[in-house]
Image (cartoon, grey):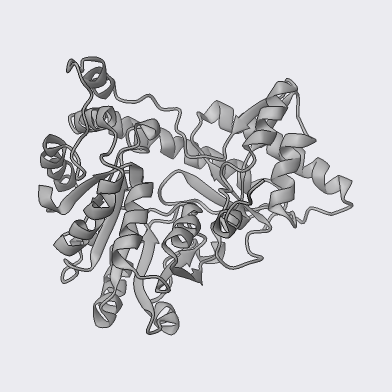
Amino acid sequence: MPAISGRGQKAYDSPIRTLIPFADAAEKRGTEVIYLNIGQPDIETPQNALAAVKNYDDRVIKYAPALGNTSYREKLPEYYRRFGIDVAPDDIMITTGASEAILLTMLSCLDEGDEIIVPEPFYAIYNGFSNIAKVKIVPLLCTVDDGYKLPQPADFERVITKRTQAIFICNPNNPTGCLYSERALQELAVLVKRHDLFLIADEVYREFCYDGQEFFSILNLPGLEKNAVVADSISKRYSACGARIGSLVTRNAEVISAAVKYARYRLSPPGLGQILAEATIDTPPAYMAEVVAEYDRRRVALYERLRKMPGVVSYRPGGAFYNFVQLPIDDSDRFCKWLLTDFSYHGTTVMLSPGTGFYATPGLGKNEVRIAYVLNVKDLNRAMDVLEAALEEYLKGRGERIETDR
């Protein structure tokens, strides 16, 4: 039998999905699994967007242009203006989710062997895409002690080398939920301009900001018109993950030109997904207001449960819908697998994402997990009942002691 490639063997596995077979096996045994491992909202997709797909009446679903449907690209600036972002249709390329936007950005902005500085922990697929693009992630550690805030410009400066080509951030952050302030981004912009780097931002959670904080886009940083590149998606804001529609947004025409060359290889982004996405722009404002309010309720409920658990270290995230949590364990991969293979509480268990997959630095994340608060408050509380019982049993079985909550 022929052997698979070396790169196939070395490919990064998703910490978000790698335990799915164990969850499937648990359900076959009759155990209910509460899924908090993945950012799949239980919020309903806007009815006006679903109606646009249902009412599609062309007799053929044709290829779209590689850049995306013209009508959608011409309408998207209307959405961005709601955040004070002034872009033109020519600044936008439609992609197959934000994932493709990130990969195409790496391929267009960095050469093999180039370095990209990324605050860690970071969204796990960045590891995978950097591996495909053959670029090196240079991580900058953020910790729960200061709420995972953006590192200082001096911290970035210390790791810049002659191979550094870009800085990559996610704001609001996945997996930590940290929202970066306008001031912090302005300070980072000075550094980016001085070293003539790309500043790439994953901004798919821009709607989800809490406690009176406001989102600020890197596209609004003066003087970075040619440096700033944004990856975006409708997946989270409109609960439309399966539509697979994202966008690459930049005023740098050369980046768009390079990215569309790669985009032509896949011919076009999803046609029906673009029809749904275009319709989302006309979604009544009340929809998003209630969605954000609902996530805020979930955020507070989850945080209140976590902070009362012995030995658990958490903080109240300012954005997105994740909480990156320290647990009194020594191996998050083993613990998350154990939850699915050996544990249930009143016939129920919970699926979490091990923290190790959200780092580039080996050995980090062993006592951390990411929790996605994408379920209603009742189910979140049930999940926390399970987690609390699981920690007690897991540690008891290993002769460990849960320290008093800090």
Residue 401 placement, left or right of 252: right
Residue 372: x and y in percent read 52, 41
Residue occupying the far front of the picture: 1
Image quarter of the C terminus? bottom right
The answer to whether residue 322 is left or right of residue 219 is right
Residue 264 visible: yes
On the image, the x and y values in percent for residue 349 come to: 70, 31
Say which quarter of the image contains residue 273.
top left
95 with respect to 348 (left or right): left
The image quadrant of residue 270 is top left
**Above or below, comparing residue 175 to residue 295 in the picture:** below
* Front-most of residues 192 and 178: 192
Residue plotted at (45% across, 43% down): 321
Q: Residue at x 58, y 50 (%)?
A: 13
Residue 224 in picture, x, y percent from top left: 19, 69
Left or right of 357? Residue 132 is left
- Residue 155 image-quadrant placement: bottom left
In percent of width and height, residue 311 lies at: 72, 53
Q: Residue at x 21, y 43 (%)?
A: 66
Residue 252 visible, this orientation: no
Tell me which residue sits at (23%, 68%) in the image: 227
